[in-house]
Amino acid sequence: APLPRTATAVGMLTAVVLANGNDGDNLYPLTEDMPLAALPVGNRPLLSYQLEMLQRAGSFGEVLVVTNDRHLSRLEAVVSEYRGPLRIELVVVEEGAGSADALRTLRGRGRLAGDFALISGDTISDVPFQKIAAMHQLHGASVTVLLKQQPPRPAADKKKARDLDGTDFVGIDESRQRLLYLESAADCDGGVITVSESMLRAHPHLEVHSDLADPHVYLFAHWVLEVLDHKPHFSSAKFELLPYLVRKQFLDQANLPLPQAEAQPQQATAMSSAAATAARLAGAVRCCCYVVPHDGHYCMRACSIAAYMQANLDICKGGAATFDKAAEPTEPLREGNFAASNIDQQSARGGSVELGPRSQVKKSAVGPHCRLGAGVRLTNCVLMEGVVVHDKVHMSNCILCRGAEVHEGATLKDVQVGSNVSVEAGANVKSEALTAEVDAEGSVVGSAEED
């Protein structure tokens, strides 16, 4: 019989990274031409941050990156650049498949033999995953969820019930290790929540929070996959599977598929411990959480334009996270050997960048093969590969996708420019998304869409 595997055994756990881009609509037009997981943050693809987190943990051997046919070739290029010890495999699922659908596909292909991590393809976190795994093992958890406390809000900026869109109400015990209640504010009537008597009897000191963000990092017990067999309509792990497990801690479990002592295969017990065995044999659902204080480890999702921009700023300036931006190229800046000091230390620069005289780049990420003319001013901007910025252009808080071009004298603020879009000379654009449109001559020009 195989020996029980522990949380510290290298190669024991499998990680599933969701890179199939179902959340990419929030980043339009950035994801129009590029999958979410390939978007550059600090001149590194987003996927590289999940891989680095898993590699640091030391307890993952295989990483299954879920994608679709449309994004496969681009992610193959990203994965080919990885040089670490993890075994990475791209797994193609149907277009539009949810996270629970993807897990069913992997289970059907025999790819998940033990406890497994499920991570969103837009998550950037330097939380030590080995601590999450240790908590999961100690408590014999059905699922362990990473939660990040948000910074306190000023008294004058308190959220009202109608402003709670996207917020979760999260109930935890006084030890801050048990996840007892989980409900989206959208599912609550005016921000009013209902708590079961059975839960309050078991945990009278329940704490309910609206300041705990879910960065979509989960560690599931293997048997939870059986729930998906019994609930074929579940499409989302976050919005259906996880709340179901949390509720089942205090409801009748007669219909919940739990492994029984006489039928439990040894290989399905991925992380054996006395607590885990006792919980499973008792037929108990146990949901745990690893809570990171607001001033603790870096943890966020680049799942919106604002969050993506903030992630770039954080990584470029350093200090906010233990991740590094892409290594600076060794060749000097081209175009007259212009001084590199005009790209400040809180910026990132890719290879083969050209920078004209009297130009300044501050708190920005400039991708490879970008060309900036004379007198250009960039502040808090992200330029992806091959962007061309002509003379005397001023931009702040802007994102320019691959191959975009901004002509002489244009001023852009809070603007996203799609791939291969051309912005006319002298344009003054604020708070818009410029997407591709072909004019009568067949040239790609900017088409404004309000944010």
Image: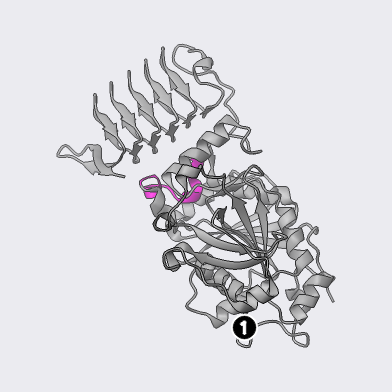
Q: Is residue 109 visible?
A: no
Scheme of image coloration: one colour
Give the residue drawn at x 55%, y 54%.
213
Give the residue drawn at x 34%, y 41%.
418
Drawn side of residue 8 relative to residue 216, left or right: right
Q: Looking at the image, is 51 positioned above or below residue 173?
A: above
* Closer to us: 377 or 61: 377
The segment highlighted magenta reads: 29-40
Q: Residue furthest left?
A: 440
Where is residue 245 drawn, in percent x and y? 60, 73
Mark 1: give few (<14), some (14-19) or many (20+) Cα within 10 Å. Answer: some
- Quarter that holds the N terminus: bottom right
Drawn side of residue 342 relative to residue 400, left or right: right
Residue type, numbered disc 1: Leu
Where is residue 109 drawn, in percent x and y? 59, 72
* Closer to us: 290 or 109: 290
Q: Looking at the image, is 253 positioned above or below residue 88?
A: below
140 falls in the magenta region: no
Residue 207 sits in which quadrant?
bottom right
* Closer to us: 197 or 411: 197
Where is residue 384 drawn, in percent x and y? 44, 35
Q: Secondary structure at mark 1?
A: loop
Give the residue drawn at x 61%, y 75%.
225
39 falls in the magenta region: yes
The residue carrying mark 1 is 256
* Closer to us: 144 or 408: 144
- Quarter that holds the C terminus: top left
Q: How many marks?
A: 1
Q: Looking at the image, is 280 positioned above or below residue 423?
A: below
Give the residue drawn at x 74%, y 54%.
130
